[in-house]
Image (cartoon, rainbow, N blue to C red):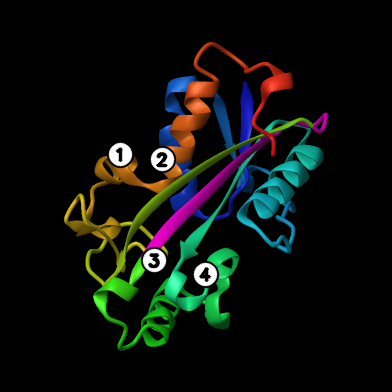
Amino acid sequence: MELVIATSNPGKFRELAAGLEALRFTLRPLWDFPGLTLPEETGATFEDNALLKAAYTARHTGLPALADDSGLVVPALGGEPGVYSARYGGKRTDKERNVFLLERMRGLPWEKRQARFVAVLVLAFPDGHAEMYRGEVEGYILEAPRGEGGFGYDPLFYLPEAGKTFAEMSPEEKARHSHRAKALRALLEAWRNGPPPRETSRLE
């Protein structure tokens, strides 16, 4: 199957492409379609935004499209940054957003620094059918970044079971633990024997 990965983020594209390798799809990046830009993320949930992007891309390319919407949820901040993770505080870069988050969490004790990463994948088809897969991982926000890998909030997100941040992990190690990897594993399981029956697809 030929599939468009509906993201303009090269880091997400690499992670999704690696996770989908077992299905042997022919993957097309969004930049293969000049002039096609993703719609504004106006949804109230990760599910809303992933569906919005996947359905739009499938409709405009005529090909199945996979979109991810993901972000960081910090309960002590009332769920921030949530669906605004990629534009938190109006900041333009990952580094600026990380600094902003640290300022928002300044002085919080360890037990109040709990956080979770959430990823929702939506596989949408030109005929309007869609499937949805979700993954989550629990961790903590450090008081300073650690590691040079990954992207987004990876340098701040500490995973106790691994004893390191996502940014300190190799791509292979991150693929075993991350929220996006969990969502991908759910998709792979659903497609293990070919396309899942549409009447039991995971559209919510």
**How far, Cα to Cα, is label 4 from label 1?**
25 Å
Q: Is residue 181 above or below residue 191?
A: below
Identified by mark 3, the residue type is Tyr
Identified by mark 1, the residue type is Arg
Residue drawn 32% across the image and 83% down it: 108
Q: Is residue 199 above or below residue 6?
A: above
Identified by mark 2, the residue type is Ala
**How far, Cα to Cα, is label 3 from label 1?**
18 Å
Q: Which residue is label 4 attached to? A: 79
Q: Which residue is label 2 attached to? A: 181
Mark nearest the camera among 3 and 4 is 4
Q: Is residue 185 above or below residue 44?
A: above
Q: Which residue is label 3 attached to? A: 153
Closer to the camera, 169 or 140? 140
Q: Which residue is label 1 attached to? A: 176
Residue at disc 4, secondary structure: loop
Q: Residue furthest front?
A: 111
Residue drawn 54% across the image and 22% down it: 190
The x and y percentages for residue 134 are 53, 42
Q: Residue furthest left?
A: 163
Q: Residue furthest top?
A: 193
Residue drawn 52% across the image and 29% down it: 187
- Mark before the other along the chain sequence, 4 or 2: 4
**How far, Cα to Cα, is label 3 from label 4?**
15 Å
Residue at disc 2, secondary structure: helix
The x and y percentages for residue 32 are 64, 42
Location of the N terminus (image quadrant):
top right
Residue drawn 22% across the image and 64% down it: 147
- Mark before the other along the chain sequence, 1 or 2: 1
| Marks 3 & 4, CB-CB < 8 Å contact | no
